Amino acid sequence: MSAETLHISEIFHSIQGESSFAGWPCAFIRLARCGHGCIGCDTAYAERDGVTLEIEEVIQKAIAFQAPFIEVTGGEPLLQPAVHGLMRQLCNLDKKVLLETGGFLSVGEVDQRVHKIIDLKAPSSGVCDQNNPENIELALAAEPPHRHTFEFKIVIASKEDYKWATSLLHQYQLSSSFTVMMGVAFGKLEPAELAEWMLRDRLQARMQLQLHKYIWDPGLRGV
Ligand code: SF4
């Protein structure tokens, strides 16, 4: 693959379902392939198919939606080095760019203008031991306003996940400097249960639901 092309799973227009941008219309660029193997991955189809497109074509398709935000997601977008050129060019066009990453690769090379939504995988994902520690270090070392372009997301499927997440939050004091979004694994944990734990523990984090799974059929792709 040349530096000017990307392997793309889908480009679509939807309502941002997660993160501190939930609720905003958003254009999504989903890059194909990941291979991280999280248990319960809800975009497994991004492993199987995809098309190779020139970066310019990807940009034109995404900006045609005229959405206030463009999210680069996957799969794992950081597996393809050309993604950096894509994000840089979108930023140069004054687009508000979000990156959602599975958190096992470093975000160190990502353009500082990009808002980074970094997964911290909890034990039930099966890949908790592969969270890249550099991402928390980079976030903690960043000075404002760059510091505000880091955001963390933790999906909770069990009480064990919740205990792991609270201990991580306390260890790094993450909530005092960053938005930390805590959500339930759809169909695995009742939102009311997580809400109860968070309120009981006076947890300084934001609860989120995967909005798109409530608006549309949870199994639908391209939303
Ligand atoms: S990092 Fe994301 S895309 Fe990759 S396997 Fe895990 S959930 Fe799926």
Image (tube, rainbow, N blue to C red):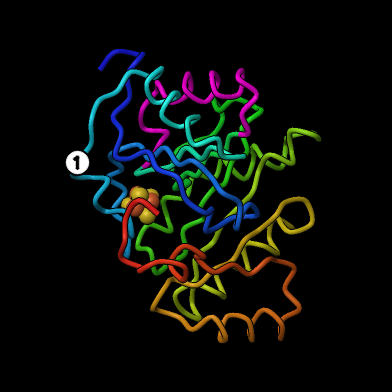
Q: Which residue is mark 1?
A: 49
User: Which residue shows up at 44% across the image and 74% down it?
Assistant: 157
User: Which amino acid type corresponds to the residue marked 1 in the rendered image?
Assistant: Asp
* Nearest to the observer: residue 168 or residue 95: 95
Query: Who's the residue at 57% across and 46% down the image?
Result: 117
Residue 160, percent from left and from top: 49, 77
Say few, some or many: other residues with alpha carbon within 10 Å of mark 1 (under 14 / 14 to 19 / 20 or more). few
Magenta span includes 91: yes
**Picture mark count:** 1
Task: State whether residue 37 is above or below residue 122.
Answer: above
The image quarter containing residue 67 is: top right
- Span colored in magenta: 76-96
Toward the viewer: 95 or 34?
A: 95
Q: Residue at x 63, y 69 (%)?
A: 207
Residue 166, by quadrant, is bottom right
Of the 4 image quadrants, the one containing the N terminus is top left
Residue 36 in the image, given as x and y percentages of width and height: 31, 48
Give the quadrant of residue 30: top left
Residue 19 left/right relative to 185? right
* Residue 63 image position (x, y, % from top left): 50, 29
Q: Is 24 a magenta residue?
A: no
Q: Residue 52 placed where, x, y %? A: 25, 25
Judged from the image, the secondary structure of the residue bearing numbered disc 1 is loop
137 sits to left or right of 215: right
